[in-house]
Amino acid sequence: MLLAGPFGRPNNAPSRSIIRCARPLLSQPWTPHSRSFCYSHTLGSLKTVPKPRPSPNPLAKDVAVIGGGITGLTTAYYISLYIPHAKITIYDKSDKLGGWMSSEKLAVKDGHVLFEWGPRTLRPDLGGSGAATANLIASLGLYNEIVPTPKTSPAATNRYIYYPDHLVRMPGPATGPMSYLSNIVTLLTEPIFQGAIGSMLAEPFVQDRSKALRDESVGHFLERRFGKTITHNLASAFFHGIYAGNLYKLSVETLLPRLWAIEGGEANESMGVLLRMVDMTLKGQKLVNLSDVAFREFNSSLHLAEGLNLIKHGETMTRIQNESVYTLANGLGSLAAQLKKVLGQNPNVTIRAGCPIESAVFDKASKTITLRGGNGNETSSTHDYVISTLGPAPLHNFLESSATLRQASISPSVTASCTHVNRAVTVMVVNLYYKEPDIIPSQYSGFGYLIPSSVPVDQNPERALGVIFGSESSGQRGPDNVLKVEVPRSIIREHIKRVERSLSDLEATQSDYKEEPRRQLKSMLSTLKEKEKIEFPNDSDETTEMVTLLGQDTAPGTKLTVMIGGHWWDGWQETDYPSESEAVEMAKSLLARHLNIMTEPEVAKARLARNCIPQYPVGYRQDMANIHRGLMSEYQGRLKVAGPWWQGAVGVNDCIRKAKEIARDIREQWDEHSGLERYQKPQEWVVIDPSDPDPVQ
């Protein structure tokens, strides 16, 4: 009997549980009228993820990627690995690839300093999307550039919010009697927490949402359950830091899905959200989205197709798994730069920079898509598959251009959904470098601080979102930012054993498609053994020395980043935005008022990032479901979407994971997937018990 696997493909593999010790969150499946967006799962109901095809999709001979940011570059990279003979073309309207991932190294008096103009740190998250980023870093050979921020560092333990006129350290895990006492004093004396304790004590008695409510704003959800203090003073600051957005306009089902699921679960009826979370924490349980489990399994199954070097992979995991966050010695922009370099060396890859795409017309007879460019760079090319990383407005143009040629029209619901989700905010990023290494007051050592919407205007006339203490999370400063570490021989020997076991298992299988996997495994085994000889030349050698860069900056001073604008600028015209020089003065004024920094920076630069962070409005998942149906109707799965506009998350990890999933979908010829297929059904969750011998980390 054929069974539907987690990705919707028929699967006749033996039935087993992905999670061995699962506890259902609900006792009944979700229905359109139930309060929850979770499914109940028993051990037998979780099916094995389908095994990869023995050979790639034969129809994917020519693939186009529209957009050369981190999502587009990663998608093209994995397609080149998964479908080696495919011709790949990358189109981007800009002359410079990389999107928002941009790092700039500047010479200063005592060395150099690195400014980030986009994302600056990554979370390990090896049980979820972070595993995809770790794989990519290993595959590109960038693991030696990893600069971690330890969980014990001030940048990890000290997070601040500015309210109402000073920085307040957020209570963290108590490490002893004094830190415990400090947390209590802060909660009882700081105005930012006034009323918060009472709201949390009352939360278990808050009435659950209406059964008919399918989504609501983050702000309304948090205010309803936890009160105005927590919502306005704490949560708004958090959402300023990640989305630069107004939490009363963002979807809670999309951005806080675990809280939304817990409130809707039947297990919550007598406990409330907060006590349910505490109960799970005390029991060591985790609420896990099944898509994370499925991704982890399929991700592992494609390591062979990626040609993933297990030594590099192991070294990458070792460096980041116990850290708070990490970055790269040459900035996160080096990740995009390395992708571009590797793709540029591939004869099957063509990069068309400065070439915007205006239409994508599908021929239902040949099942090909013709792309046409404009803006003085006229082009017309036909492809078997197209991946678009652009936003809703360009996608709507693609749909309309294709339908119009057939003398048809797209569904009004698709048009309405594209319009509804076509929202993004603009942020001014100001980077400053001061030659003084200790210019930040010592009592405020940490990652930085965020500014909630409840701060009075006279304390934030610049409408800043927050300040990042960049030097605290970019590694060791100064000319001696190099570390030599000892790596045990046991690591490489364990990798050799794993490959030998895989080779043995392969030989024992009955398959007509063993030749290519056998060749790759033997090549990998040979490489590992050669690596062992080089790194450990003597039989008695049990360790080898590895050189690690400890930081981004050889200059010993301090770098700060001020973020301004976001949702505060909603409705502004282009002429309303401050100039770059005005933004620098605004940042200096804010730092003087908040941190008493009166010194002039040695270097100060600003950049305006227009429409850089998509916003996810209430009803986002339903909009995505509508657009999925529109894509399937018009392109029959040959045009897929990826990137932050479509995944309900803005993080680099999420972009890389989605890129990998899209490349996998094309390799497997999953033409029922558009990149939005997961929105067709409610999110699925399961509680993982600590007794599980193979938990999601």
Image (cartoon, rainbow, N blue to C red):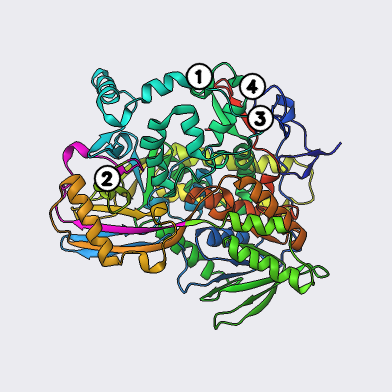
Query: Is label 3 or label 1 in front?
Result: 3
Q: Which residues are magenta?
A: 425-454
User: Residue under circle 3?
Assistant: 211
Closer to the eye: label 3 or 4: 3
Q: Quadrant of residue 7?
A: top right
Callout 3 amino acid: Lys
Q: Position of residue 87 (x, y in %)?
A: 65, 70
Q: Nearer the viewer, residue 107 or 489?
A: 107
Does the image show residue 309? no
Within 10 Å of disc 3 (Cα), the crowding (few <14, some 14-19, many 20+) is few
Query: Is 579 colored magenta in this rendering?
Result: no
Q: Is residue 284 left or right of residue 303?
A: left
Disc 1 on helix, strand or loop? helix
Mark 4: few, some, or many residues within 10 Å (few <14, many ≥20)? some
- Disc 2 on helix, strand or loop? helix
- Residue assigned mark 4: 266
Q: Kindly identify which numbered label has been placed on residue 204.
A: 1
Side of 21 relative to 479 (left or right): right
Mark 3 or mark 4, which has the lower sequence index?
Answer: 3
Give the number of the mark in front: 2 or 4: 4
Q: Amino acid at mark 2?
A: Glu
**Alpha carbon of mark 1 to alpha carbon of mark 4: how far?**
14 Å
Q: Quadrant of the N terminus?
A: top right
Residue ID for mark 2: 472
